[in-house]
Amino acid sequence: MTKGTNITIDVPLRNPMGDSTITDKAELQKKRFKGIVLHLLAKADETGKVKIGLNKNRKDNPKN
């Protein structure tokens, strides 16, 4: 394993209250990233401090 932090974070900025009524997992996965989503990257620099910024190298179809 390598040293340092390298974490991608997807933060959807929407109200998920209506998602509790959806029972189909495929439909729920499709709706999950609708609207505004922040794609962040937390990565350690040379000094070891963690920097957080936009993840420009993300995939368009996220999988969990």
Image (tube, grey):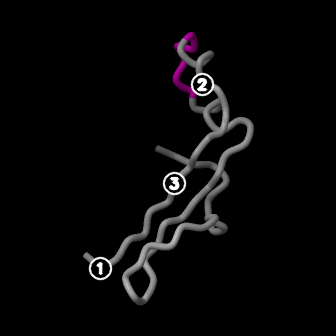
Vertical side of 1 occupied by 52: above or below: above
Q: CA distance from mark 3 to mark 2?
A: 17 Å
Mark 2 lies on a secondary structure that is helix
Q: Earlier in the sequence, mark 2 or mark 1?
A: 1
For disc 2, the marked residue is 16
Task: Mark 2: give few (<14), some (14-19) or many (20+) Cα within 10 Å.
Answer: few
Q: What is the three-letter code of the residue carrying label 1?
A: Lys
For disc 1, the marked residue is 3
Q: Quadrant of residue 6?
A: bottom left
- In percent of the image, x 29 and y 79: which residue is there? 2
Q: Is residue 20 left or right of residue 48?
A: right
Look at the numbered discs 3 and 2 and tell me whether their residues touch, using CB distance below 8 Å. Answer: no
* Residue placed furthest toward the top: 21
Q: Earlier in the sequence, mark 1 or mark 3?
A: 1
Look at the numbered discs 1 and 3 and tell me whether their residues touch, using CB distance below 8 Å. Answer: no
* Residue placed furthest toward the left: 1
Q: Earlier in the sequence, mark 3 or mark 2?
A: 3
For disc 3, the marked residue is 9
Task: Mark 3: give few (<14), some (14-19) or many (20+) Cα within 10 Å.
Answer: few
Task: Mark 1: give few (<14), some (14-19) or many (20+) Cα within 10 Å.
Answer: few
- In percent of the image, x 62 and y 40: which residue is there? 12
Mark 1 lies on a secondary structure that is loop
Mark 3 lies on a secondary structure that is strand
